[in-house]
Image (cartoon, rainbow, N blue to C red):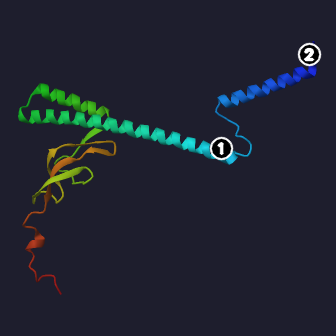
Amino acid sequence: MPSSPASDEERGARQAEGAAQVADQASGAVEPPPGDDERYLRALADLENYRKRSAQEVDRRVTEQAERLLLDWIEAVDSVDRALSMQPSDGLRSVLEQMEAILARQGVERVGAAGDRFDPELHEAISVRESDEVPARTVLDVARSGYRRGERVLRPAQVVVSREGGGSEREQEPSGEGED
């Protein structure tokens, strides 16, 4: 039985409509059931929020793992540094330079040097020493270097901090002067 032109057109229209639906489904656009628009939109928003939270969680875990690895590497750098301070060696100095270059490539920098102003974000005071030679709250000595990666402190420097000496002008002023 030959097909009529009208039935061919209807069949073509149905096939085109079906292809459009398959294309919409493949691209992620799904038509919500009638009357459930609000529930559909809420579920879609929840799914998007879940995807964002999951991506943030993965980023956070990757960063934490990288920082743990860097802290282990920093401990090895400390050991080589201590060995060099006990017995200087050109070979060991080369190894230390190479290790510090690896840290630098990872964006890690050493913090805490004698003469720096004490910053509780970067330094951990392990001792306080009186000194008239430098201003108060100045790092006098570094017991253990600190490190940071970008703005994040991986490990604070352990430092000896200065304070005003016992013979400061304020303490030497007579008690009766300047009082009205």
Quarter of the image with the N terminus in it: top right
Q: Residue at the spot x=20%, y=30% of the render?
A: 97
- State the residue lying farthest toward the bottom: 180
Within 10 Å of the Cα at label 1, are there few (<14), some (14-19), or many (20+) other Cα atoms?
Answer: some
Q: Position of residue 132 (x, y in %)?
A: 10, 60
Vertical side of 117 occupied by 66: above or below: above
The residue identified by callout 2 is 3
Where residue 167 sits, quadrant-wise, is bottom left
Residue 40's disc number: 1
Cβ atoms at labels 2 and 1 below 8 Å apart: no
Foreground residue among 172 and 45: 45
Foreground residue among 43 and 175: 43
Q: Is residue 180 rendered to the left or right of residue 150?
A: left
Q: Position of residue 112 (x, y in %)?
A: 21, 46
Q: Mark 2 belongs to which amino acid?
A: Ser
Q: Is residue 75 rendered to the left or right of residue 82?
A: right
Q: Residue at the spot x=28%, y=34% of the render?
A: 69
Q: Residue at the spot x=39%, y=40% of the render?
A: 60
Which SS class for mark 1?
A: helix
Q: Mark 1 belongs to which amino acid?
A: Tyr
Q: Position of residue 105 (x, y in %)?
A: 31, 32
Which SS class for mark 2?
A: loop
Vertical side of 53 occupied by 97: above or below: above
Q: CA distance from mark 2 to mark 1?
A: 42 Å
Vertical side of 4 occupied by 21: above or below: below
Q: Is residue 84 rendered to the left or right of residue 5?
A: left
